[in-house]
Amino acid sequence: MITILSETQGIHQLYIRELRDQAIQKDRMRFRLNLRRLAVALGHRLSETLVYEACEVTTPLGTASGWELKDQPVLATILRAGMPMHDGMLEVFDGADNAFVSAYRRYLPGGEFEIEVDYMSAPDLTGRTVILTDPMLATGASMACVWEALLKNGEPEQLHVVSTVASREGMAAVQKSLPSSTHYWVGALDDETTARGYIVPGLGDAGDLAYGSKKS
């Protein structure tokens, strides 16, 4: 299942527009803020699909009924670009466990690239609900490699993938490599990718825009 936030009206449309705007992107702090705010919006939508249990809470004047999550999810983030969105997800799921995976493109002669995963920190994922966040779902290669790495820590019961912008090519690829029950939550879905695997119109390199350019 795919939920595309830009198909509905709301303040999230402002966040997506500003994230794409190359003039506003010059302000790194605002770019990180908009990634975080969009993650909060996506997180609230995602939260509606989780399982809750009834509970009671004592107020200064009596007792009220309420709800609590049956189980806390695991928030998994692809470093480094995913960190602002991870912060937003933590605002929504403040009791969640956390996982971090370092994955990057290593370019080969001719412009092709392969994904390198060189670091992972994660709890036991057996039977857990995992929310995997990466701002850009371009070719889907990073997401597939990170999922394979996470499986070394156990098989989750449910997987949610959260991205700011996804391409149709990348979405088709991950739907083949990730579990069929995966729910995808994206801010916007774009039609094209370049030969170097960047989304068009997209918003550029989210990691560089958030934290500065890196040596290739």
Image (cartoon, rainbow, N blue to C red):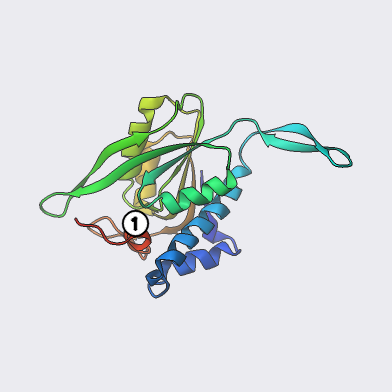
User: Is the residue marked by circle 1 packed among few (<14), some (14-19), or many (20+) residues within 10 Å?
Assistant: some
- What residue is at 47 percent from the left and 24 percent from the top? 126
- In this rendering, would 8 be left or right of 132? right
Residue 30 higher or lower than 215, as above or below? below
**Front position in the image: 172 or 45:** 45
Residue farthest to the bottom? 23
- Where residue 19 appears, as percent x and y from the top left, is 44, 65
The quadrant the C terminus occupies is bottom left
Instruction: From the image, tell me which residue sits under label 1.
Output: 207
- What residue is at 51 percent from the left and 64 percent from the top? 15
- What residue is at 52 percent from the left and 60 percent from the top? 6
**Quarter location, residue 199:** bottom left
- Where residue 170 appears, as percent x and y from the top left, is 35, 49
> Helix or strand or loop: what does disc 1 sit on?
helix
Q: How many discs appear?
A: 1
- Where residue 187 appears, as percent x and y from the top left, is 49, 57
Residue farthest to the front? 60
**Front position in the image: 19 or 111:** 19
